[in-house]
Image (spheres, grey):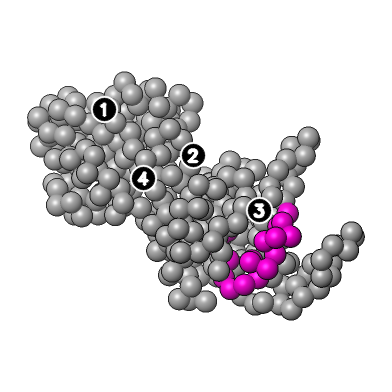
Amino acid sequence: MVVVSGSNSRALAEDLAMELGWDHHLLEARRFPDSEGYIRIPEESIDAVRNGPVVLVSNTFPDAGIVETLLLLNALKDVRSGLTENLKEIGPQSMDDVGTGLIVAIPYFGYSRQDKRFRPGEAISAKTIGKLLSQHCDGIVVFDLHAPAALEGLSVPVAFTSAMPEVANHLKENVNPDFILSPDKGAIDRASSVAEAINLPFSYLEKTRIDAHTIVHKAKNLDVDGKIVAIVDDMIATGGTICKAADALKSQGAKEIHAACTHGLFTGGAISRLTNHVDGVHSTSSLVNSRAVISGGPALARGVREILEKL
Ligand code: R5P
C-alpha cells in the first residue's frame, strides 16, 4: 500500500503516508518545453503501486492539475492492470491485473465553486470534473469540498473529509479565541463545528456577493466587544469575504481577529490585503502557501480509511 504524488502535492502526500503508516513514492511529472505535461511511474515504483491499494494525492488546481491528475491516474491504472508493454521493451511487457484499489485524494478540488448552473447555458464545472475523475479511479477523497452535493451520484464512492477538527485544535492552541464567526451562511456547518469542538459561542453573517471583488454583509449585532474572534471559512481567495467580516467585527469592538480556512488560494495580493484587516491568517496544507500551518494529512487519512472500507 503506497501513497503517490506528482508535481503538486508532495508534502501533503508525505504527511498522509506518515498518518497511514504507508510508504510514499514520488512519480515523475514534468513539463515539455511547449508546456504539455509528461508523467511516468518510475521502474522502481512499479511493484509498489501494484501491491495493494494506491492513493494518488493530486490537486485539480490550477487547470494543469486536472490534466496531470488524469494522466497519473491512467498511468497507474495501466500498470495495475498489467499493461506495461513499451517500445523500448523495458521490464516485463505484461503482468497480471491486480484489481481495484486506485484511490485519488484531492486536497483542493478546483472549480468547486461552480457547483450549480447559476444562469442558463453554464457548465456545472465541479460535476464535470468529478465525472471525469470517477472514470479513472475506484474511489475519491475530497477535502472540505465547497458544496458536496456537486459530487453526488458518481459511479465510485466519494469520501468528504474535513480539516475542521484540526483547525479547531490549531486555533485553541495558538490563538485561544473567545468567539467563532462564519462569514456567510455557506460556512455555518464548518465554522459551528469548530465552535462546538472548542466550546465557544458562534454566529454568522449574511453575505451578498455583487461580483468577484465586491461583497456586502447584512448588518448584525455580534457579542464581540473586547474579544478575540476567529473567522472560519472553507477557502480564502481574494480575501474580500474575510476583510469585510473583519471590518464588521472591528466596528463592534473585537480586540483581535484571526482568519482560518482549509484552502488558502490567496489570489491577487490577498495576503497583504488580509494583513491590513486581521491579526493572523491560518490555512491547511491543501495548497502550498506561506500560511499553511495546519497539516491536511490527518483529514485525508480519515477519508482514505472511509474509502478503503467501501472497496
Ligand atoms: C464562498 O462562499 C466561499 O465559502 C468563500 O467565502 C469565498 O470563496 C471566499 O472568496 P474571497 O476570499 O474571494 O472572498
Q: Earlier in the sequence, mark 3 or mark 1?
A: 3
- In space, the residues marked 1 and 4 are separated at their CA atoms by 17 Å
Magenta highlight range = 40-56
**Mark 3 touches mark 4? (CB < 8 Å):** no
In this rendering, would 145 be left or right of 274?
A: right
Q: Earlier in the sequence, mark 3 or mark 4?
A: 3
Q: In this rendering, which labeled residue sits more in front, label 3 or label 1?
A: 3
Q: Earlier in the sequence, mark 1 or mark 2?
A: 1
- In space, the residues marked 1 and 2 are separated at their CA atoms by 21 Å
Residue pointed to by mark 4: 294
Residue pointed to by mark 2: 288
Quadrant of the image occupied by residue 30: top right
Residue behind label 1 places its C-beta within 8 angstroms of ligand 1:
no
- In space, the residues marked 3 and 4 are separated at their CA atoms by 25 Å
**Mark 4 touches mark 2? (CB < 8 Å):** no
Question: Residue 15, how many percent across, how many down?
Answer: 45, 53
Q: Earlier in the sequence, mark 1 or mark 4?
A: 1
Which residue does the image show at 26% across and 27% down from the upper left?
279
**Mark 1 touches mark 4? (CB < 8 Å):** no
Rendered-image quadrant of the N terminus: bottom right
Circle 2 crowding by C-alpha within 10 Å: few under 14, some 14–19, many from 20: some
Task: Give the secondary structure at mark 3.
Answer: loop
Which residue type carries mark 3? Leu
Residue pointed to by mark 1: 279
Question: Residue 264, how many percent across, how many down?
Answer: 42, 38
Image vertical order of residue 86 relative to residue 234, above or below: below
Which residue type carries mark 1? Asp
In this rendering, would 301 be left or right of 255?
A: right
